[in-house]
Image: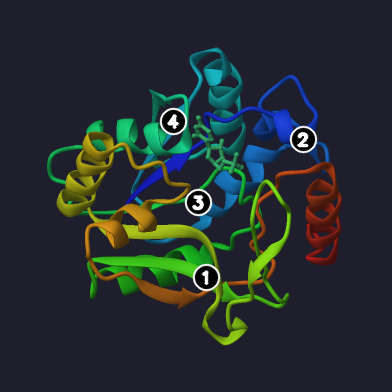
Amino acid sequence: MYLLIPAAGSGRRMGSSRNKLLLPLLDKPLLTWTLAAVKASRSIRWVGIMGQPNDFPDFKEIVSSLGMTKCVHFFPGGATRQESVYKGLQALPAVAERVLIHDGARCLVTPDFIDRCAAELLHCPGLIAAIPVKDTIKVVEPVTQLITHTPDRRHLWAAQTPQGFAVEPLIRCHQEGVAQGWEVTDDSALFEQCGLPVKIVPGEESNLKVTTPMDLAIAESILRQRGV
Ligand code: C5P
């Protein structure tokens, strides 16, 4: 299975001037934990990491510190996650039929879960890891800050990564997104906008995306609980 890792973000919401994926988590750069899970996955054979070129020396050091034997390639990312993924898709080998996409910032993903998504992807054109939401979600009018409605929680799932797709339709969806000016925060949204089916793979609650300093503290505590 082919895997693309968007890793070209910044540390803005983390309050950091550098890429949050290079911040220490239990004394190792955050991206090390993500890549350790990828290394241990049995299904992933080829890895493409989209990053800002000034981070490549650090990324390469992480890959070599893990002694990864899988093929790992580095590609320049874009100004948004959407752009970074599109660039990665364009860099995939022509023989790639299916691809998993996993955010570098979801550093607590487990190798087994990656393998489960890879296995499921052989039977459907699109899937995402997701978990049912625990909170009641409000839709809020941005200017007045008044609630417009409360969707039925039983139908709400929080999207995670890995997300997986057949490569050819996903590239077409990204092209359509560029043509139509769609701005999305995951790849599933492009598939959905194009009317293509996306299946849910019930995810792991611990598979959080590290965004804020609080997430970093939670991630650290989960890793300690795992006894790493
Ligand atoms: O900012 P956020 O955490 O939502 O980003 C999700 C993932 O997308 C992160 O792993 C981040 O590095 C990546 N990203 C990217 N290119 C961007 C912005 C974010 O690859 N321009």
Tell me: is circle 4 under 8 Å from ligand 1.
Answer: yes
Residue of label 1: 130
Q: Is residue 72 in sight in this rendering?
A: no
Tags 2 and 4 touching, CB below 8 Å: no
Q: If the image is split into quadrants, where does the C terminus sit?
A: bottom right
Distance between mark 3 and mark 4 Cα atoms: 15 Å
Distance between mark 2 and mark 1 Cα atoms: 23 Å
Residue 187 at x, y percent in the picture: 37, 51
Amino acid bearing label 4: Met
Identify the residue shown where x is 55% and y is 74%: 157
Residue of label 2: 14
Identify the residue shown where x is 83% and y is 42%: 213
Amino acid bearing label 1: Ala
Residue of label 3: 38
Residue at disc 2, secondary structure: helix
Residue 215 at x, y percent in the picture: 79, 51
For this orientation, the residue located farthest to the front is 144
Residue of label 4: 50
| Location of residue 218 by image quarter | bottom right
User: On screen, 178 above or below 26?
Assistant: above
User: On screen, 22 above or below 133?
Assistant: above
